[in-house]
Image (spheres, rainbow, N blue to C red):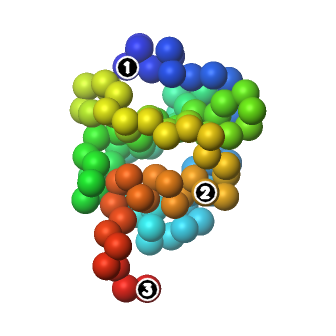
C-alpha cells in the first residue's frame, strides 16, 4: 500500500467526498463496497466487488480541483485510471467502470 503515495496530489476532505458518493444511495452500495479507508487525507480507498471491477478504487484530488480515480487490483497495482473528473460526475464515472450495465431499468 506504500506505493499509493505516488498517486496522490494533495490533501482533501475524504469524508465530504464519501458523503457525495453515498448520496447516490443504491448506486454506491451496488459497487459491493466492503472497506472504506482514508489514506492520509490524500486519498479515499474503496474495496469494491462490482460487475466490471473487483479490487480497489482509489480517489484523489488534483491541484486543479478535479478528481482522479485509479482502479487497482487486489495488490494495489493500477489497472486503469480516469482523470479530470468534476465532483458532479464522480459517482457516474466510478459506476460506469465498476458496476453499470446499460440495460438496467430505472
Q: Nearer the viewer, residue 105 or 59?
A: 105
The residue sitting at 33% across, 61% down in the picture is: 99
| Nearer-the-camera pick, 82 or 106 | 82
- Neighbours of disc 2 within 10 Å: few (<14), some (14-19), many (20+): few
Screen quadrant of the C terminus: bottom left
Q: Of helix, strand and loop, which one carries label 3?
A: loop
- Secondary structure under tag 2 reads helix
Disc 3 versus disc 2: distance between alpha carbons? 18 Å
Disc 1 to disc 2, how far (Cα)? 27 Å
Indicate the position of residue 35 as horizontal and vertical percent values.
37, 44
Pinpoint residue 34: horizontal percent, then vertical percent: 33, 50
Residue at the extreme bottom of the image, as rendered: 106
Q: Earlier in the sequence, mark 3 or mark 1?
A: 1
Q: Residue at x 36, y 65 (%)?
A: 100
Closer to the chain start, of discs 3 and 2, is 2
Instruction: Name the outermost residue toward the right.
Output: 64
Using residue 46 as the reference point, say whether residue 68 is left or right of it: right
Q: Which mark is residue 1?
A: 1
Left or right: 71 in relation to 43 = left
Q: Residues within 10 Å of mark 1 (few under 14, many from 20)?
A: few
Amino acid at each position: 500500500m506504500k506505493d499509493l503515495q505516488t498517486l496522490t496530489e494533495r490533501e482533501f476532505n475524504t469524508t465530504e467526498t464519501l458523503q457525495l458518493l453515498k448520496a447516490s444511495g443504491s448506486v454506491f452500495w451496488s459497487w459491493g463496497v466492503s472497506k472504506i479507508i482514508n489514506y492520509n487525507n490524500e486519498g479515499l480507498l474503496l474495496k469494491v466487488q462490482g460487475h466490471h471491477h473487483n479490487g480497489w478504487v482509489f480517489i484523489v484530488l488534483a491541484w486543479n480541483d478535479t478528481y482522479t480515480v485509479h482502479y487497482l487490483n487486489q495488490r494495489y497495482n493500477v489497472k486503469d485510471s480516469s482523470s479530470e473528473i468534476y465532483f458532479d460526475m464522480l459517482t457516474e464515472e466510478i459506476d460506469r467502470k465498476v458496476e453499470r450495465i446499460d440495460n438496467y431499468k430505472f
